[in-house]
Amino acid sequence: MSAPFDRMITGDAALFVALGIGFAFGWFLERGGMGDARRISGQFHFTNMAVLKLMFSAIVTAALGAFWLARAGWLDLSRVYIPETYLLPQAAGGLVFGSGFVTAGLCPGTSCVAAATGKLDGLAAMAGLLLGVLLVGAVYPAIAPFYDSTPRGALTVPALFGMPHGAALLALVALALGCFAGAARMERHAAGAGR
Amino acid sequence: VTRVHAAAAAGATGLAILAAAAGDPPARLLPDAQLPAPPAVAAVALAERIRARDPLLVLDARDPASFATFSVPTAVHLDADTAERVRADRAVIVYARRDGDAAAIAARMRARTLDAAVLEGGVQAWIEEVLEPRLYLDATPADTQAYRRAAEVSRYFGGVPRAGVERPPPRATSDAAADDAIARTQRRGC
């Protein structure tokens, strides 16, 4: 009989596995071109859709992987942490995050990747990230009521729409393939306009 | 679109179609019975922690009517649907109609890395040990010491400690005994 991953890998070994996964995550982000601010900011101008394609590929891979690992008895879905939804604070956070993303051309993960490859804009974005963390920590008592407002619990698409996991997966894959086709068309259009 | 892209798209579509046909994966692999038992907290120890304003989240997993009638101070009601979603950056103490129910909830919370424990004896223990501590005539020195500790915290919560009373027959731990204990607190005036 198979055993869940979290029972096979425990204690310090889990930390090393996490470190390995972190390195692999950074490596693949870099190889996917996500350490290049110009390439990322192309997403916001619809001239380079690499971010959408990479992120959606990762989502589809993770969703299919989680489903089939759970079906095979290798992953305990009840022990996978699902972040809770807080509508208004997360909408506000998304706006702040998006503003920083489009300004720097980097998000927290890609700024680390850019910094690791010696890019100064990556280091600057990381400094901004740490300053932002400090700032939010300093003003947290004042914003705590807003921070905890409009809670909706840990939402999942199957639970929200009352549909089976597999049907939600099929819809997700169809949406991803549609977006990939649309992204390819946009890139061709942008390349044609640029000539 | 390269051949690799087309193959990946076909593979993902195939796996998704199979997933739709395969049915939902099991929600939980590890049965509750196999989860390690959560630690238990005695009522007096919990009372001391509440009085000391320790960062605590006390959860009452009984039915809403029982919660409305009587609950441990600072406790918030927990319904079965939200038990899996509780998130806390402080210690969690759970009590329910039966300790076994509270232990199952706390064990699942501990599986999600929450620092959860069970209030041993639930509401009945809270009433008998915190609100109504008794020092019996045949008390040992250890009993006396425990009584003094309970009496100190009891007064803080509006309890009525009594010394020098006859020892009653061994206490029952049933739903009826818990209801009796709650009814006693309701009859008590201000």
Image (cartoon, grey):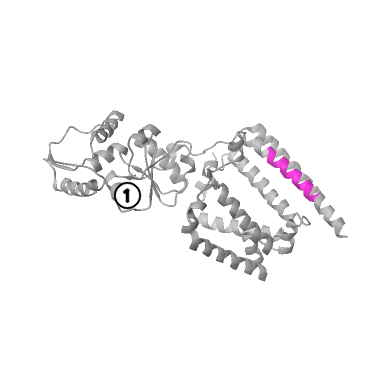
Residue that appears at 78% across and 50% down: A183
Residue at the disc numbered 1: B50
Question: Callout 1 environment at 10 Å: few (<14), some (14 to 19), or many (20+)?
Answer: some
Picture residue at 86% right of the left edge, 57% below the top: A193
Task: Locate residue A150 relative to residue B107 in the image: left or right.
Answer: right
> Measured from the top left, where is residue A77 in percent x and y?
55, 42
Kind of residue at badge 1: Ile
Q: Can residue A176 be found in the magenta stretch?
A: yes
Relative horizontal placement of residue B21, taking residue B123 as reference (left or right)? right
Task: Label 1: state its secondary structure.
Answer: helix
Predominant SS along the magenta part? helix
- Does residue A24 appear in this view? no
Q: Quadrant of the C terminus of chain A?
A: bottom right
Range shown magenta = A170-184
At x 87% / y 56%, what residue is drawn? Answer: A192
**Looking at this view, is A161 or A110 the one in front?**
A161
Residue A169 appears in the figure: yes
Is residue A127 a member of the stretch shown in magenta?
no
- Which chain letter goes with mark 1? B
Q: In front here: B13 or B98?
A: B98
Q: Residue at x 29, y 31 (%)?
A: B179
